[in-house]
Image (spheres, rainbow, N blue to C red):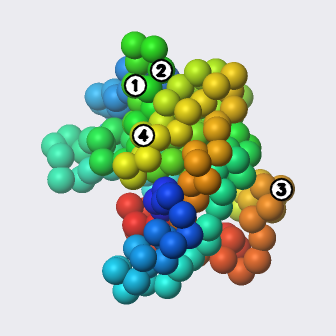
Amino acid sequence: MTGRELALRREVMLAFAATGDPPAVADQPALRALAERHVVVLDDAAVPPRILMAHPFAGHREGARVDAPGRSWWGNCAWDALGIVAALGLQEATIHADGLTLAVRDGEVDAGGGALFHVAVPARRWWEDIADT
Amino acid sequence: MRLFRSEEDVQGWAAGEGRPVGAIVPVPQLQRLARAWYGDRLDPAWRPRTVEQSQRILRDAGLTGAFWALG
């Protein structure tokens, strides 16, 4: 990964962390390089292409939401939501995923009333369709 | 990847979708995985992991076997 790509990736991650949304990116060649490395996932139907995912963050609103006082972030699933909690070092948060709620207190998630995370697709095939795993 | 209330709900979802049940991970184990997988994503020193490094994270989280093989 080039220095230019690493810098853009950091810009993307910091924007997600600060706002919950992806930034507008002018450097489309570097963004495309990040997509080829699976660092970001792009919505190519948008002009210019919009960042749909930069794991654990998601630019769409169809997955999981992490709420902290006055702030929210979005991920694709509960794994990503817990990743956002970890990446941001959140001590208190509430995760909403698939109609269920998980509470994080003192940095630890509750057991979710015995909630279970199901992975439907074997790991080696995740990137065949990252939206259906 | 979805969160469910119970194993019965997983099985019901899989039957409804006509798909096999994959792997089921309890939430506390998922948090251990998420910390190791994503905890460094805002670190200025972050660099891409190798497949071997990612596989080690899965293994250390207790996720082993053919289903969890990345390569």
SS for tag 1? Answer: strand
Q: Nearer the viewer, mark 3 or mark 4?
A: 4
Is A95 left, or right, of A32 in this rendering?
right
Residue placed furthest toward the top: A70
Q: Dot 3 corresponds to which residue?
A: B60
Marks 2 and 3, how far apart at CA? 29 Å
Q: Dot 4 corresponds to which residue?
A: A96
Q: Dot 1 corresponds to which residue?
A: A72
Amino acid, disc 1: Ser
Total marks placed: 4
Quarter where residue A89 is shown: top right
Q: Dot 2 corresponds to which residue?
A: A68
Q: Are marks 3 and 1 on the same chain?
A: no
Q: Chain of mark 4?
A: A
SS for tag 3? Answer: helix
x 56%, y 76%: residue = B22
Q: Are marks 4 and 2 on the same chain?
A: yes
Q: Are marks 3 and 4 on the same chain?
A: no
Please say if the residues under marks 3 and 4 sit with CB atoms less than 8 Å apart: no
Pinpoint residue B13: horizontal percent, then vertical percent: 40, 73
x 53%, y 79%: residue = B21
Pinpoint residue A15: horizontal percent, then vertical percent: 42, 23
B62 vs A32: above or below? below
Q: Are marks 1 and 4 on the same chain?
A: yes
Amino acid, disc 2: Ala
> Crowdedness of circle 2 by 10 Å Cα count: few (<14), some, many (20+)?
some
Residue A9 visible to the viewer: no
